[in-house]
Amino acid sequence: MGDTVVRTTAALPRWVVLIAVIGGLFVVVPLAAMALRVDWPRFIPLVTSESAEAALLLSLRTSLTATALCIVFGVPMALVLARTSFRGQQVLRSLVLLPLVLPPVVGGIALLYTFGRRGLLGSSLDVLGIDVAFSTTAVVMSQAFVALPFLVLSLEGALRSVGTRYEAVGATLGAGRWTVLRRITLPLVLPALVSGSVLSFARALGEFGATLTFAGSLQGTTRTLPLEVYLQRETDPDAAVALSLILVLVAVAVVGVAHRVRPLDGAAGPLPFRAPAMARP
Amino acid sequence: MMPRPALAPRRRAAPRSAPRSVARSAVVPVAVLLFTAACGSSGAPAGDAGGPDGAADGSVTVFAAASLRASFTDLAARFEEAHPGADVRLNVAGSSDLVTQIIEGAPADVFAPADTASMDRVEAAGLLRGTAVDIATNTLRLAVPSDNPADIASLADAARPGVRTVVCAEQVPCGAAAARIEEAAGIDLDPVSEESSVTDVLGKVASGEADAGLVYATDIRAAGDTVLGIDVPEASDAVTTYPVAALADASDPATAQAFVDFVAGPDGRAVLGAAGFGAP
């Protein structure tokens, strides 16, 4: 793998490499500049203050819940998009992936007009005694809304790549639909499911705009880490920088995990037959 | 090695067009840098010559608080009309963001924050030219949705259990003012949300998510029919003052000072008064 990269680089025109380096610096230098501004002697007290700890715990709790929701709803969505075909499927796929490209604040406004007290479903929910305004539930909904496309996209791509040959074989050997799904399809795309979930988690952790618009900001209830960073910046930039660094470290870890888990590399386990026989383009 | 699932694997760019698209995508960050630099610099190089001989016909970059947006847009147009050749550029953001930008070296000529504390920070950094002038005051009022669902008539009503009240967080000026009002009134509001900006408080009230919120009198006036305003007597204990000053590094000091004098003068008073600001 490493050899391949080096050889490809050598074959490129130099100016392409030069521009790529400039682009890379554009991404890396600001992160380094921020790390240089961290007030290291105060770092531990800053990130363990009461408000910071409350924000961090809330962020972890809500992001994990949102990721679980993404898996529960995203896996069936990816299966439907990859394994069925129907009229308007392309349009549906585009709509489902829309939160990926929407500015999050627009997502927040959309959620507000749906689940808010005066929203499309808000009054019906009110009758049922469900009230999401200014609650932690609203935070989880905002995060799931923006994170869901990441899982659907990764999983659908993997489902299309692995193809349906093994599923067909399983079915001809007498496996029912549920057995095929459980014993063949899902194990084949497990690495993509893991990396998609990790990306969804990261997106949920970084959610800011939709939360701010839809859920509000109250310590311990709706003020997640990004909102805490935004607020601390007003009076204590050192605290904002320290907390930002925590988010950067989490992001680095997440990207690392997502890149490690490559499709198929870990799928040898629960397969009903040996994986190396698979077609690799 | 399987194709990466993350991006649509079926539609790859044709090999021939690849180098061009690589170049284009790599050029974007550079273009962003250049664009940002261009936006930051204050000016038409040739036209700025008006400064030294005292005529207010150069360009001036004004860093103004978000609550001054409408008034200063109007004032900028009037100033340009009164001073042919002058060019006013407005950069509008939260006061503390503006302070950070100025201290980090953004090329600002005039600073107009929403509180004296922000001006003090810029003055402490030695970046003021002369002293600041107060141009307006603002007072917090209680905003409720136009149908007033929780039937709020006073600050005490907003503190009732079950009433959803939203305020600014204490870290921002409107939140600090709200805290002083609560103290003066002996009322503990127990808000459902402490927002980072007064705009977010107003948004929660205007959309009906919140039953009441403490916002500036000028915000209620600008919101029109979507919210009702209720006076809070204790708000007189927490009046916010808006100062304005020319900055030490102004590229065209004469035009910068002329703009400060303009907003502090009768034109400024008329426009700010119409927006609901009090006299300093």
Image: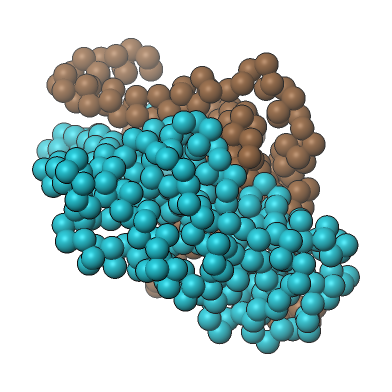
Chain colours: A brown, B cyan
The percent coordinates of residue A200 (x first, y second) are: 57, 45
B25 displayed left or right of A119: left
Looking at the picture, tell me which residue is in the foreground, B100 or A124: B100
Report whether residue A127 is seen.
yes
A202 displayed left or right of A66: left
- Residue at coordinates 63% horizontally, 50% vertically from top-left? B172
Above or below, A189 against B238 in this view is above
Above or below, B155 against A27 in this view is below
The percent coordinates of residue B260 (x first, y second) are: 37, 53
* Quadrant assignment for the N terminus of chain B: top left
- Residue at coordinates 56% horizontally, 84% vertically from top-left? B225
Q: Which quarter of the figure has residue A116?
A: bottom right
Report whether residue A131 is seen.
no
The percent coordinates of residue B97 (x first, y second) are: 50, 44
The percent coordinates of residue B87 (x first, y second) are: 23, 55
Looking at the picture, tell me which residue is in the foreground, B55 or A171: B55
Above or below, A182 against A252 in this view is below
Furthest-bottom residue in this view = B147
Looking at the picture, tell me which residue is in the foreground, A146 or B118: B118
A147 displayed left or right of B180: left
Above or below, A99 against B248 in this view is below
B126 displayed left or right of B209: left
- Residue at coordinates 36% horizontally, 51% vertically from top-left? B62
Q: Which quarter of the figure has residue B234?
A: bottom right
- Residue at coordinates 83% horizontally, 57% vertically from top-left? B183
Q: How many marks?
A: 0
* Quadrant assignment for the C terminus of chain B: bottom right
Looking at the picture, tell me which residue is in the foreground, B85 or B163: B85
